[in-house]
Image (cartoon, helix red, strand yellow):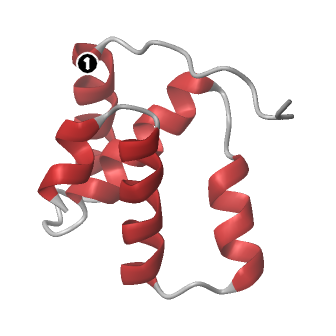
């Protein structure tokens, strides 16, 4: 039995909208689309556990993105994992 909460079904449009807001807040700087998407998913789930773990272990950004994509694939969000 896992201590992790069950995944919440997110509305893709809500995630897209929030990811775009994050992009705009950063001054429309390109190259962070996956970071914005995954941050939007975490926010909408109300969990920043993965971000906290990565910050605590000083994981290089490319490794962190790959790990998030792997997690997305395990959770069934293959459209995210496939594009990394």
Quadrant of the frame with the C terminus: bottom left
Task: Pinpoint residue 38: horizontal percent, then vertical percent.
Answer: 40, 46
Q: Secondary structure at mark 1?
A: helix
**Residue linked to disc 1:** 12
Q: Nearer the viewer, residue 26 or 33?
A: 33
Q: Quadrant for the N terminus, please.
A: top right
Residue 73 location, quadrant:
top left
Count of picture labels: 1
> In the displayed structure, would residue 18 be above or below residue 30?
above
Residue 41 location (% of width, % of height):
45, 33
**10 left or right of 80 in image:** right
From this view, report whether residue 45 is shown above or below residue 80: above
Q: In terms of image quadrants, where is residue 22?
A: top left
The residue at the point 18 percent across, 38 percent down is 79
Q: Residue at x 25, y 18 (%)?
A: 12
Q: Residues within 10 Å of mark 1 (few under 14, many from 20)?
A: few
Give residue 14's position: percent from left, percent from top. Answer: 31, 16
Left or right, 80 with reference to 63: left
Q: Residue at x 13, y 55 (%)?
A: 83
Give the left or right position of residue 74, taking residue 5 as reference: left
18 left or right of 51?
A: left
Quarter holding residue 7: top right
Above or below residue 12? Residue 28 is below
Q: Position of residue 58 (x, y in %)?
A: 66, 86
């Amino acid at each position: 039995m896992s201590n992790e909460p069950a995944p919440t079904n997110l509305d893709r449009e809500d995630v897209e909208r929030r990811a775009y807001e994050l992009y705009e807040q950063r001054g429309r700087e390109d190259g962070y689309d996956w970071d914005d998407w995954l941050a939007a998913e975490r926010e909408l789930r109300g969990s920043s556990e993965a971000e906290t773990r990565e910050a605590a272990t000083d994981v290089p950004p490319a490794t962190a993105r790959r790990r998030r994509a792997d997690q997305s694939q395990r959770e069934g969000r293959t459209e995210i994992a496939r594009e990394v």
